[in-house]
C-alpha cells in the first residue's frame, strides 16, 4: 500500500463522514473531524465522556495529515500517515466499525426517462456477503467468496461485490423507485450461504489436510522418541543423585554450617572495638561479603520468610510428562488441519440491475 493509495483511502474515509476540509495540498491535508470520527481516532475518550455527561457543545478537533515525509513544511504541526502507522490502523478500525454492515439503494436516474407514463421502477432486494474461508494447518490459505442472494426470487450468485462496485448507490431510496417484497428472510438467506460454502468445500481438493496430518505424525514420532530416551536416562540420574545424597549425609563427611563457622570464628577471635565492629558490618554488606548476606540479615533483626509461607507450586519444575503433554498440544494446534469461516462484511442492497453472474 503505497502513499498515493493511502491518501486516496484516507480521503475516501473522510468523505464518507462529510468531513470539513480546511486545506488540501499535494503533500498534506487539514481537516476538522466530525463527532463520529473524533470519537474513533481522536484519542480523547475522557473528553467525550465529560462532554456527554455535562451535555455541552463539543469542540471539534483539527488534524493535519502528511503523506510525504520529505515535504513536511517547517512550523506546521501534523502527523505522517503511512501503511502501518497507528493513525491509519485507527482509520481501518473505524471503517470496519461503521461500514461492516450497510443498506444501500441503486440510483439510476436515466431509467426514469424511459419509463414514459409509468413513473416508477422496482428495486430487488439482495443480501451481499464477502466471506473468508481459511484453510489452516502449519500453512494457511485464504479463499475469498463474494456471494449475493436474491431475497425476492431466491438464488445465489458469485462475484456479487464486483458487480455492485460498478453501480451508483445511495443510503436513501431514490425517487420514483419502490422495493419488492422479501420472500426470504435474512436468517434463511444466511443458512443458504452456509450450505453453499459447504458445497464449495466438498468440491475443494483436500490433499493439503492429508499432507498436514502426515507432517503431524512425523513431528509426534520425533517427540515420542525424544521422551523415550529421556525416560531411559532418568533411572541413571536418580541413582547418581541418591549416591550423592548418601555421601553428603554420612557422619565422616558432615561439614559445618555457615552459622557454626561464624560462631566458632567469633569465639576464637578477640572482641573488636566499636569502630572496628562497624567496619566489619560494612564489609559484610559489601559485594565482597555477599556470601554472608544471610548472617547480615539475621544480625540486623530482619525476619526470614518461613518455608511454609512460600508457594512451592509456582517454583516447581515441570515433569517430563507435563512437558510432553504441553508440546503435543502445541503440535496439534500447529499442524492439525481445520477450516475457519468468517464474514468480512455484508449488506442489504436494493438493485434495479441484476447481476449477470451465476453459480
Image (cartoon, rainbow, N blue to C red):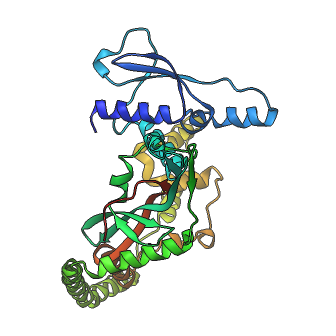
Residue 140: % across, % down: 27, 66
Say whether residue 35 is left or right of residue 83.
right
The residue nearer to you, when weighing 167 against 210, is 167
One can see residue 82 in this view: no
Q: Nearer the viewer, residue 157 or 87?
A: 157
Q: Relative to 233, is 42 above or below?
A: above
Viewer-proximal residue among 63 and 307: 63
- Position of residue 294 measured from the top left corner of the image (x, y, whole percent): 52, 56
The residue at the point 32 percent across, 61 percent down is: 356
| Left or right: 299, with 260 as reference point | right
Pick the quarter of the image with the C terminus.
Answer: bottom left
Q: Position of residue 238 (x, y in %)?
A: 31, 87
Asked if residue 130 is positioned above or below residue 97 in the image, the reply reads below
Residue 330 versus residue 275 in the image, above or below: below
The quadrant holding residue 134 is bottom left
Image side of residue 296 versus residue 65, left or right:
right
- Name the one closer to the observer, 91 or 311: 91
- Identified at 70% across, 27% down, the residue is 58
Estimate the x, y position of residue 241 in percent, counting from the top left: 32, 83
Q: Residue at x 33, y 53 (%)?
A: 162
Q: Quadrant of the N terminus?
A: top left
Amino acid at each position: 500500500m503505497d502513499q498515493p493509495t493511502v491518501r486516496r483511502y484516507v480521503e475516501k474515509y473522510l468523505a464518507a463522514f462529510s468531513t470539513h476540509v480546511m486545506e488540501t495540498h499535494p503533500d498534506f491535508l487539514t481537516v476538522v473531524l466530525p463527532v463520529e470520527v473524533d470519537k474513533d481516532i481522536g484519542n480523547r475518550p475522557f473528553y467525550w465522556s465529560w462532554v456527554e455527561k455535562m451535555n455541552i457543545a463539543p469542540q471539534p478537533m483539527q488534524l493535519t495529515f502528511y503523506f510525504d515525509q520529505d515535504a513536511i513544511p517547517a512550523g506546521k504541526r501534523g502527523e505522517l500517515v503511512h501503511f502501518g502507522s497507528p493513525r491509519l490502523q485507527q482509520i481501518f478500525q473505524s471503517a470496519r466499525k461503521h461500514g461492516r454492515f450497510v443498506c444501500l439503494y441503486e440510483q439510476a436516474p436515466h431509467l426514469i426517462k424511459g419509463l414514459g407514463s409509468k413513473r416508477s421502477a422496482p428495486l430487488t432486494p439482495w443480501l451481499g456477503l464477502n466471506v473468508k474461508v481459511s484453510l489452516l494447518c502449519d500453512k494457511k490459505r485464504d479463499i475469498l467468496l463474494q456471494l449475493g442472494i436474491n431475497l425476492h426470487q431466491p438464488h445465489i450468485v458469485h462475484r456479487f461485490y464486483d458487480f455492485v462496485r460498478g453501480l451508483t448507490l445511495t443510503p436513501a431510496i431514490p425517487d420514483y423507485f419502490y422495493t419488492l417484497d422479501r420472500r426470504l428472510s435474512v436468517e434463511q438467506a444466511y443458512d443458504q450461504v452456509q450450505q453453499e460454502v459447504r458445497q464449495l468445500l466438498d468440491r475443494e481438493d483436500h490433499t493439503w489436510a492429508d499432507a498436514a496430518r502426515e507432517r503431524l505424525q512425523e513431528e509426534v514420532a520425533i517427540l515420542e522418541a525424544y521422551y523415550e530416551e529421556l525416560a531411559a536416562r532418568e533411572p541413571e540420574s536418580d541413582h547418581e543423585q541418591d549416591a550423592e545424597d548418601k555421601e553428603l549425609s554420612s557422619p565422616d563427611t558432615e561439614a559445618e554450617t555457615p552459622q557454626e563457622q561464624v560462631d566458632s570464628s567469633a569465639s576464637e577471635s578477640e572482641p573488636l572495638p566499636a569502630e572496628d565492629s562497624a567496619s566489619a558490618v560494612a564489609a559484610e554488606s559489601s559485594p565482597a561479603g555477599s556470601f554472608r548476606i544471610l548472617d547480615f540479615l539475621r544480625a540486623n533483626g530482619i525476619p526470614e520468610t518461613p518455608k511454609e509461607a512460600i508457594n512451592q507450586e509456582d517454583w516447581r519444575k515441570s515433569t517430563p510428562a507435563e512437558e510432553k503433554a504441553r508440546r503435543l498440544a502445541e503440535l496439534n494446534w500447529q499442524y492439525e488441519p481445520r477450516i475457519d469461516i468468517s464474514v468480512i462484511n455484508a449488506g442489504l442492497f436494493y438493485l434495479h440491475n441484476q447481476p449477470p453472474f451465476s453459480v
